Image (cartoon, rainbow, N blue to C red):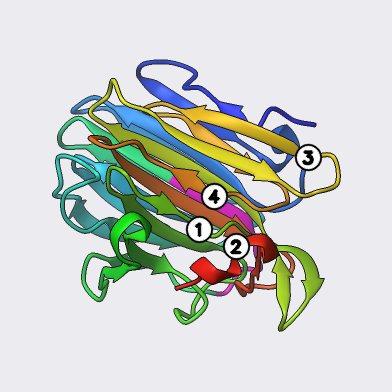
Amino acid sequence: MTDLLRRPLAATGTLHDITPESAGWDHAGLAVHRLRQGEGLSRATKDREAILVLIEGRAEMSAGEERFGEMGDRTSPFKGLPHALYVPAESDWSARATSDCIIAVCSAPARPGHAARCLGPKGLHPVNRGEGILARRVTEIAMEAQEGADTLLVREVVTPGGAWASWPGHRHDKDDFPRITRLEEISYHRVAPECGFAVQRIFDGNGLDVTLTIRDGDVTLVPRGHHPRGVPPGVDLYSLIVMAGPLRALRVETDPAFTAFED
């Protein structure tokens, strides 16, 4: 089994570079880059589509021949809405930091033909889900209802101290639409305060059962199984969640032991 918890590779530059090959699966990828003011970054998408999410800070962004200007206006992923840019397959993109910034590059296989476009913050509407210890704030950047992508599904979730996300545990690891779909999942996490932590259990009842301690800047991988996350009191957890699979649809199966907690 591939290591499901990835610590940052460095303090600056490329913090994470998760490819399907390094994850041991077929679809989802995620790279995270920290740029200092004035630094630039460019990539070609080749046979994959990409969604660039400004986690924090600002950068001038372009895709193909189109310039989108300065994007990003939050100093922390816990504050405000994300600025995001969709880049189609067989294209390229570039970013030049106008302040220190962190850019997440979500990717998955795709056919060319979609147009590059901004995905936020305009048109994004955070939703508060659950109550009490099940409360969290969800911002859907590119989910099933939002057309214009081949395989990528991307959302942000902020879980406050003392609460649980993805609870009860659910799974999306089988091709049985519309009951359940098979989606690989990668999450980039930020923890506030930085000294805090969160936990995630990933289990499938068939040999996979791990509990991960998430610290600020970590990435977790979910190849299969249920995968709830819990946050201790006094700590907030931000998660950028990237999903991709054969069908661009999220259908889940709840852990039958805890269906009474469904919201």
Q: CA distance from mark 2 to mark 4?
A: 12 Å
Q: CA distance from mark 4 to mark 1?
A: 5 Å
The amino acid type, in three-letter code, at marker 4 is Pro
- For the residues labelled 2 and 4, say whether their Cβ atoms are less than 8 Å apart: no
Q: CA distance from mark 3 to mark 1?
A: 18 Å
The amino acid type, in three-letter code, at marker 1 is Trp
**Counting other residues with Cα less than 10 Å from the Cα at mark 1, is it few (<14), some (14-19), or many (20 or more)?**
many
Residue designated by label 4:
228
What segment carries the magenta color?
105-113
Instruction: Please state the horizontal and vertical placement of residue 113, each as a whole percent of the image.
Output: 57, 74
Residue designated by label 1:
167
Q: Where, quadrant-wise, is the C terminus in this rendering?
A: bottom left
Give the mark nearest the N terminus, 2 or 4: 4
Instruction: Please state the horizontal and vertical placement of residue 192, each as a whole percent of the image.
Output: 25, 33
Q: Residue at x 60, y 51 (%)?
A: 185
Query: Which labelled disc corresponds to residue 258?
Result: 2
Q: Residue at x 47, y 82 (%)?
A: 145
Can residue 201 be seen? yes
Task: Give the structural element (helix, strand or loop) at label 2.
Answer: helix
- For the residues labelled 2 and 1, say whether their Cβ atoms are less than 8 Å apart: yes
Instruction: Please state the horizontal and vertical placement of residue 83, each as a whole percent of the image.
Output: 26, 57
Residue designated by label 3:
208
